[in-house]
Image (cartoon, helix red, strand yellow):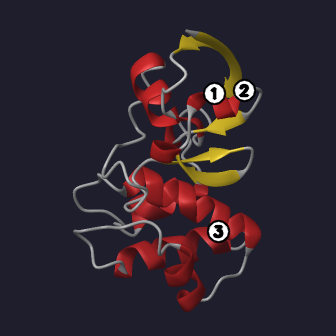
């Protein structure tokens, strides 16, 4: 077993895990943060996307030990109390989900996309989310949600 110290959703955590433990396993099984989903285990679907030091990362392909000292944000860490993050609120308002399985990873990837490009076009949103798959929605409402959230995050509506 190895001891790992990291910050998860603004809380410093020290956990023990096997050296082969994936970050997604650490989050879901050791820390009980089950909003991060395991979809494919091959980095194809993006359901496991979290933020590591401000970058969206597919946590099914990253070892937990690589996160020593890192700051990780999961879908559970976006909201402030009972107030949704603007991206979460936009996904809700624009119904950017159906079954919801991909939603946490999609929201996390979209947050980084908008942080890097505060005023994306529809094409830039579609391109920026290519690493996150949704089998239900057809992406139309997801794109609307990201564009709406970008506007709010820029100080618009």
Mark 2 neighbour class, 10 Å CA radius: few under 14, some 14 to 19, many 20 or more: few
Q: Estimate the spatial distance between the alpha carbons at disc 2 and disc 3, rounded to whole Å.
A: 25 Å
- For label 1, the SS is helix
Q: Residue 20: percent from the left, percent from the top?
A: 49, 27
Front of the two marks 3 and 1: 1
Q: Estimate the spatial distance between the alpha carbons at disc 2 and disc 1, rounded to whole Å.
A: 6 Å
To which residue does mark 2 refer?
Answer: 68
Residue at 62% in and 39% down: 73
Q: Estimate the spatial distance between the alpha carbons at disc 3 and disc 1, rounded to whole Å.
A: 26 Å
Front of the two marks 2 and 3: 2
- For label 3, the SS is helix
Toward the viewer: 9 or 95? 9
To which residue does mark 3 refer?
Answer: 113
Side (left or right) of 49 relative to 28: right
Residue at 52% in and 34% down: 23
Residue at 53% in and 82% down: 127
Residue at 69% in and 54% down: 55
Give the mark nearest the N terminus, 2 or 3.
Answer: 2
Mark 3 neighbour class, 10 Å CA radius: few under 14, some 14 to 19, many 20 or more: many
To which residue does mark 1 refer?
Answer: 65
Give the mark nearest the N terminus, 3 or 1.
Answer: 1
């Amino acid at each position: 077993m190895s001891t790992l110290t990291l910050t998860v959703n603004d809380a410093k955590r020290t956990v023990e895990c096997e050296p082969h433990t994936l970050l997604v396993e650490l989050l879901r099984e050791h820390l009980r943060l089950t909003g991060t989903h395991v979809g494919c285990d091959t980095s194809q679907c993006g359901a496991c996307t979290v933020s590591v030091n401000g970058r969206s990362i597919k946590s099914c392909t990253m070892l937990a030990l690589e996160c020593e000292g890192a700051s990780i944000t999961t879908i559970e860490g976006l909201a402030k109390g009972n107030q949704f993050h603007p991206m979460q609120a936009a996904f809700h308002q624009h119904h950017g989900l159906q079954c919801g399985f991909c939603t946490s990873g999609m929201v996390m990837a979209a947050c980084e996309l908008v942080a890097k490009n505060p005023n994306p076009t529809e094409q830039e949103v579609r391109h920026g989310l290519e690493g996150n798959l949704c089998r239900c929605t057809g992406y139309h409402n997801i794109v609307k949600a990201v564009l709406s959230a970008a506007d709010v995050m820029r100080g618009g509506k």
